[in-house]
């Protein structure tokens, strides 16, 4: 056996299933968080104790609008008529990779 993780059918099945379920669950969480943001007035996010700037709120809401759109495309609920970099706002939330 070579060094590192083995490659068996069970390993491939486990990894592929876990990734597929992870993507599905992550998109569900993104949509739920976007619903929270949509229901939260900007003034609630800029006031204490959160104290975001209006620019921060715009980036946050834009990022989750883009991510929710990606979720809708993933689910077949929406088409993507032109190419879009869904990382445009989300990468601002990611910090250091």
Image: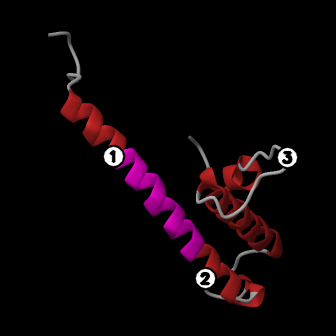
User: Magenta part of the protein: which range?
Assistant: 18-32
Q: CA distance from mark 1 to mark 2?
A: 29 Å
Question: How many marks can you see?
Answer: 3
According to the image, label 3 marks what residue? 82
Q: Dominant secondary structure of the magenta stretch?
A: helix
According to the image, label 1 marks what residue? 17
Quadrant where the N terminus lies? top left
Q: Residue at x 27, y 38 (%)?
A: 13
Q: Closer to the camera: disc 3 or disc 2?
A: 3
For numbered disc 1, what is the local secondary structure? Answer: helix
Q: Closer to the camera: disc 1 or disc 2?
A: 1
According to the image, label 2 marks what residue? 36
> Which of pointers 3 and 2 lies earlier in the amino acid sequence?
2
Q: Quadrant of residue 68?
A: bottom right
| Residue 34 left/right relative to 24 | right
> Which of pointers 3 and 1 lies earlier in the amino acid sequence?
1
């Amino acid at each position: 056996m070579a060094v590192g993780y083995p490659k068996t059918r069970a390993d491939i099945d486990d990894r592929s299933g876990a990734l597929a379920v992870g993507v599905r669950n992550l998109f569900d969480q993104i949509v739920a968080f976007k619903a929270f943001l949509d229901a939260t007035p900007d003034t609630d996010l800029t006031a204490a104790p959160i104290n975001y700037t209006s620019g921060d709120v715009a980036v946050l809401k834009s990022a989750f609008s883009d991510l929710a759109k990606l979720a809708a495309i993933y689910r077949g609920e929406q088409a993507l008529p032109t190419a879009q970099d869904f990382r445009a706002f989300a990468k601002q939330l990611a910090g250091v990779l």
